[in-house]
Image (cartoon, grey):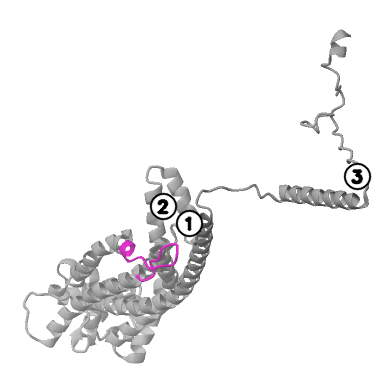
Amino acid sequence: MDKIINVPFGYLLDWLYQFTTNYGLALILFAVIVQLVLLPITAKSKRSMMKMSRISPRLQEIKEKYANDQQKQTEAIQKLYKEENVSMTGGCLWSFVPLLILIPLYAVIREPITYMLHETVENANKIVEVVQKGLPDLFTGQNSFYGQLIAAPHIQKFADAIREAGIAVSDRTLNGLNFMFLGIDLGAVPSFTNLTFTWARIGSLLIPILSAGSQVVSMLVSQRMNNSVVTDKNGIYDKETAKKSQANKSNKVMLWMMPLMSLWIGFSVPAALSLYWFIGGVIRLVEDVILTKHYRKIYDAEDAERLKKHMEQEALEAEKERIRAEKRAANPDGITENTSKKKLQKQQQREEEAAKAAAAKEYAAKKGETVEKPEEKQTMSGVADRPHCKGRAYDPNRYSSQATEE
């Protein structure tokens, strides 16, 4: 896996070095290209993190609602993730993918004889041994781990010794690499020992300091931008939840821990690695700002729609409450009549029949006629109070005296 990543990127760094004839400039362009290659993965990671930040108020609400029921809490959280299309592990996974690529890339910078000069690992180790014999002070302590990076700019000085050692290398390898950039030796490890006020010394110290500082700025900007999309279920920005979110608590720890680690590493490795890390951090900061603005437009549109629906619902509820208040004011005693549609129709029918009967009686009286009383409609059971109780075995005389005598 390392070879699949390192070899092509090694050729890329070599080509950039030959094109610019400056290792520092080639390293800067290399860092930019690497971050652009990782941009699709970075975008997925950023989107996932912003979604998690965005729904944090609703997550907090669920946790408070089901504080004593872990199962319901988990089900409600899973439902929310599904509705918002948020992966429970996607953000973390996409954050780790760039690391799986970036970590092997350090070997491209750490081992320039292998990946830039394209020598075998065996030949590279032999070259380092020859240079180490001539300059033992450069390979003390942890510096031995970066043997190729330290030896590469000194190969030309020991070209004869390398030939005498019988190491079969190309003429280009014997010319070595020039690691000077703006008067700073990128192959040297920054150190406070024997500090002299020269630009080469000061510049090598500034690179790891700038690298750590850029991380602080990057994390502050990222945290603020992620918090800007924290909204509740109605699409309203929730500042308090944004401050209390778990991500903010984690970021406060990382805000100081990561830069301090970067600073410590920066003074333990050659300046080339710190420069690469510094430029990569600046590019990631620019990408973070651009991606945040892009996704904020999408989320702002969603929040605006959500807020619109919330306001429409509030207006509807307010109108219903107004109507209820008017009814309460018109009927303070709370007396209500049965106003079902079926009973109203029957009542209206009875009133119409009574009006017709009264009109017919009045008309007959004027003509001197008598109006026969209409025959009352017999119920099925013969019992006025129980008109529909007749069945197959119905016998109206079952409990009469005649039935008893029989």
Q: CA distance from mark 3 to mark 2?
A: 77 Å
Q: Nearer the viewer, residue 371 or 316?
A: 371
Q: Residue at x 15, y 79 (%)?
A: 205
Residue under numbered circle 1: 80
Residue under numbered circle 2: 62
Kind of residue sitting beneath label 3: Val
Q: Are marks 3 and 2 in contact (CB under 8 Å)?
A: no
Q: Is residue 1 visible?
A: no
User: How many discs mark residues in the rendered view?
Assistant: 3
Give how far across and how far down residue 86 sits, in percent. 47, 61
Kind of residue sitting beneath label 2: Ile
Within 10 Å of disc 2 (Cα), the crowding (few <14, some 14-19, many 20+) is some
Instruction: Say above or below: 42 vs 322.
Output: below
Q: Is residue 65 visible?
A: yes
Residue under numbered circle 3: 371
Residue 240 drawn in magenta: yes
Instruction: Say above or below: 353 vs 42.
Output: above
For the C terminus, the quadrant is: top right
Answer with mark 3 or mark 1, whichever residue precedes in sequence: 1
Residues in magenta, as a range = 228-242
